[in-house]
DNA sequence: GTATGATATTGTATGAAGTAAGATATTTGG
DNA sequence: CCAAATATCTTACTTCATACAATATCATAC
């Protein structure tokens, strides 16, 4: 219960930050939302996860919501903590530290970051210039990222499958209010990275109870028009509640 | 990307700590390992989770291992991060803060803690007086605990069920190398808090492939002696590997 | 050595859910 | 009207969870 060294007071207290991983599906690809940062030296545009140091009086969850809101304008998104990253090596790259020191006006020694994860519809993010540009980037082709953001994203992608297994409702965060069976199936295929039998998928989807068909259909397709379905949250909660009592 | 206030420099940087939740099963009860702390004022003995502020140059995982080792003498335990707690309210109780300030010789304003979780055999912990006494305490009858340790434990208990669903092997961390079918079943019953059908449990256990019967049996019982089983890790890994490739 | 108490172990039947694959229906563009 | 493309329905097979009752084995008492 003692502290190791007393001599370098300046960097004794680690800083704490929150980083948000927003995942979305754009057509055929799993994407992550990155924000721009201007390099003070070269003036080059680089990218990073939305994140910042926490304020003195805010909770971690609050900080994550604030940052998400500042970056995307979104409120009320299911944003959940999934892991903290605190390796001293995170700040090994001097460029990254220099940029953060300029941005925060603080002497940065070490940062422990609490990573949050949310799923959302790509279209819904209206990139508000007010808080700096943000951009959906395919996971498969990420640019160089500062700190260990690459690793954080990799861990986040692993995490969504675990979430989906436990809370099936969150797939619908990826989808618009009305969606076709094809869209839902493709979403699963992208996340789990494996193809699924169309027929069995239909049967399964219909047996769930909370994916309900509407009367509307897709228009202007060169084939039979697909029916639109919607997610019935009330029904979902009813079914879930039953499961938990058994 | 700005910091809220500049006037109270002393507590601007949050401290970062690691707390370890060790769960074990003692007879019929789920227990957590608590360490003693002497209250400076009253001299009363109080209890808390094993934990401390992190060192300047150590990773979070390292810190957790160090603390676990200092407290219990144990090494090589599956210790995994499960959540961070950072509410400013954590340090609302002045007694707790005062104690920590005395112990650490630091001015404490706010602490973000990264909680770790491990399952282990109750018997294996040799409470080494060297690092202060530690004690297994039933979850059902916890004393008053400092900070939000009560909440951390509650979250940890929820978490083990999730872990167990994803990685069935970890039940065996609760059990000795040789165990009876009854012991394994009771372990499940305690963790999930529901009784299980004996016959179905046997059938299931035998179908798993990695719980293998030995020739040894329990001795000195006033009834038919139970067979000892063991966990075959190699077989388990083989089966798991197959599952992941599909 | 036999009976008894106590617990360990085992089989079978039923239904639900997942998997595989063939057959049919609907729409649009030519 | 036909072909292409996809949606939907159907049927059989397999695997898994659940419910339930009888038999085997051991230590002890007599």
Image (cartoon, coloured by chain):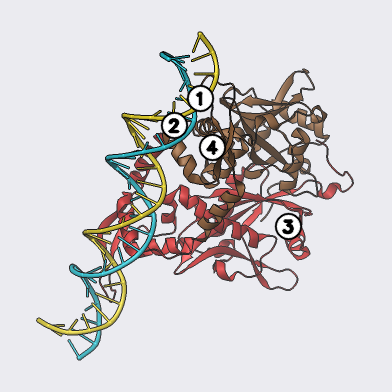
Chain colours: A brown, B red, C yellow, D cyan
> In the image, which is nearer the foreground, mark 1 or mark 3?
1
Circle 1: element type = loop
Residue underneath mark 2: A198
Q: How many labels does the image show?
A: 4
Mark 2 neighbour density, 10 Å: few (under 14) some (14–19) many (20 or more): few
Residue B153 vertical placement versus A170 (above, below): below
Residue C28 vertical placement versus A115 (above, below): above
| Same-chain status of marks 1 and 3 | no
Q: Residue at x 39, y 63 (%)?
A: B196
> In the image, which is nearer the foreground, mark 4 or mark 3?
4
| Same-chain status of marks 4 and 1 | yes
Q: In which quarter of the image is the C terminus of chain B?
A: top left
Q: Residue B90 carries which label?
A: 3
- The extreme right residue here reads B7
Picture quarter containing residue A45?
Answer: top right
> In the image, which is nearer the foreground, mark 4 or mark 2?
2
Question: Disc 4 versus disc 1: distance between alpha carbons?
Answer: 36 Å
Question: Disc 4 versus disc 3: distance between alpha carbons?
Answer: 30 Å
Residue underneath mark 4: A158
Residue A26 vertical placement versus D17 (above, below): above
Picture quarter containing residue B235?
Answer: top left
Q: Which chain carries label 3?
A: B
Of callouts 1 and 2, the N-terminal one = 2
Contact flag, marks 4 and 1 (Cβ < 8 Å): no
Of callouts 4 and 2, the N-terminal one = 4
Q: Which chain carries label 2?
A: A
Residue underneath mark 1: A224
Circle 4: element type = helix
Give residue A168's position: percent from left, percent from top: 54, 44
Contact flag, marks 1 and 3 (Cβ < 8 Å): no
Give residue B87's position: percent from left, percent from top: 73, 53
């Amino acid at each position: 219960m003692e502290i190791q060294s007393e001599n370098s007071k300046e960097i004794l207290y680690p800083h704490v930050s929150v980083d948000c991983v927003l995942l979305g599906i754009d057509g055929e690809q799993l994407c992550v939302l990155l924000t721009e940062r201007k390099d003070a030296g070269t003036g080059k545009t680089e990218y990073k996860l939305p994140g910042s140091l926490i304020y003195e009086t805010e909770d971690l969850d609050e900080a994550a919501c604030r940052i998400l809101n500042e970056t995307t304008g979104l409120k009320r998104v299911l944003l959940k903590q999934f892991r903290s990253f605190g390796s001293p090596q995170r700040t090994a790259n001097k460029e990254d530290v220099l940029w953060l020191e300029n941005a925060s006006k603080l002497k940065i020694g070490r940062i422990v970051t609490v990573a949050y994860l949310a799923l959302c519809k790509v279209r819904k993010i209206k990139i508000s210039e007010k808080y700096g540009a943000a951009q959906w980037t395919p996971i498969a082709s990420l640019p160089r990222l500062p700190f260990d953001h690459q690793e954080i994203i990799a861990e986040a992608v692993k995490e969504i499958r675990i979430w989906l297994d436990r809370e099936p409702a969150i797939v619908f965060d990826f989808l618009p209010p009305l969606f076709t069976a094809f869209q839902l199936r493709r979403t699963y295929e992208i996340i789990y990275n494996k193809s699924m039998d169309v027929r069995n998928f239909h049967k399964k989807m219909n047996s769930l109870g909370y994916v309900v068909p509407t009367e509307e259909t897709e228009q202007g397709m060169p084939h039979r028009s697909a029916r639109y379905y919607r997610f019935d949250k009330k029904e979902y909660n009813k079914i879930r509640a039953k499961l938990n009592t058994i």
